[in-house]
């Protein structure tokens, strides 16, 4: 069983910063990709940051230069540092990991979601 626990969401004013964390625990052999997605009401879930095993990262243009994803392999934890936040960044944010678990099975796991609201 693999669990992801997210933390760090909240209410922030435009231009402010927040840092999200997502810790994975359970029977994980290795994690080969981690990412953050967001979903605003009435919209599809979208990738906002991804990082693979070698450390390569990717971001959509909408957050490039404002969001930074990082990971602590020893803690199986992924972070999302968000700065210069805009009202349009308001959404529920979900972490995702792609991992190899017991038996060599490749699985996708999701966090429970944490709300980020950018408003004055």
Image: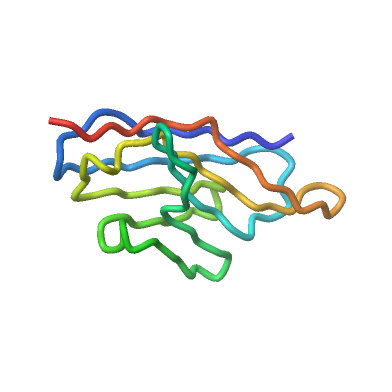
Q: In which quarter of the image is the C terminus?
A: top left
Q: Residue 16: where, in percent of width, then height?
A: 17, 42
Above or below for 74 versus 3: below
Residue under the image location 22 percent in, 43 percent down: 17
Residue 23 shown left or right of residue 106 in the figure:
left
Q: In this view, does 47 lie above or below 9?
A: below
The quarter of the displayed image where residue 14 is located: top left
Residue shown at 53% from the left, 30% from the top:
112
Q: How many dots with numbers? A: 0
Q: Quadrant of the N terminus?
A: top right
Q: Quadrant of residue 119?
A: top left
Residue 77: image x %, image y %?
51, 46
Q: Which colour scheme is used?
A: rainbow
Residue 91: give x, y in percent of width and height: 36, 36
Q: Is residue 102 left or right of residue 67?
A: right
Can you tell which quarter of the image residue 117 is in?
top left
Q: Which one is in front, 111 or 30?
A: 111
Which residue does the image show at 55% across and 71% down from the upper left? 54
Extreme residue toward the right, this view: 103
Q: Residue furthest front?
A: 42
Tell me: 66 left or right of 114.
left
Name which residue lies at 55% across and 64% down: 52
- Please state the horizontal and vertical placement of residue 5, each as a whole percent of the image: 53, 33
| Along the viewing direction, whichever of 58 and 56 lies nearer the viewer | 58
On screen, residue 9 above or below 88: above
- Return the residue nearer the eye: 10 or 43: 43
Residue 71, placed above or below residue 7: below
């Amino acid at each position: 069983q693999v669990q992801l626990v997210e933390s760090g969401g909240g209410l922030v004013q435009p231009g402010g910063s927040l840092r999200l964390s997502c810790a994975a625990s359970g029977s994980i052999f290795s994690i080969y990709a981690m990412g953050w997605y967001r979903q605003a009401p009435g919209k599809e879930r979208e990738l906002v940051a991804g990082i693979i095993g070698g450390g390569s990262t990717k971001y959509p243009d909408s957050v490039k230069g404002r969001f930074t994803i990082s990971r602590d392999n020893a803690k199986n934890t992924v972070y999302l540092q968000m700065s210069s936040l805009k009202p349009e960044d308001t959404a529920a944010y979900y972490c995702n990991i792609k991992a190899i678990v017991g038996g060599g099975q490749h699985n996708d796991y999701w966090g429970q979601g944490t709300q980020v609201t950018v408003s004055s």
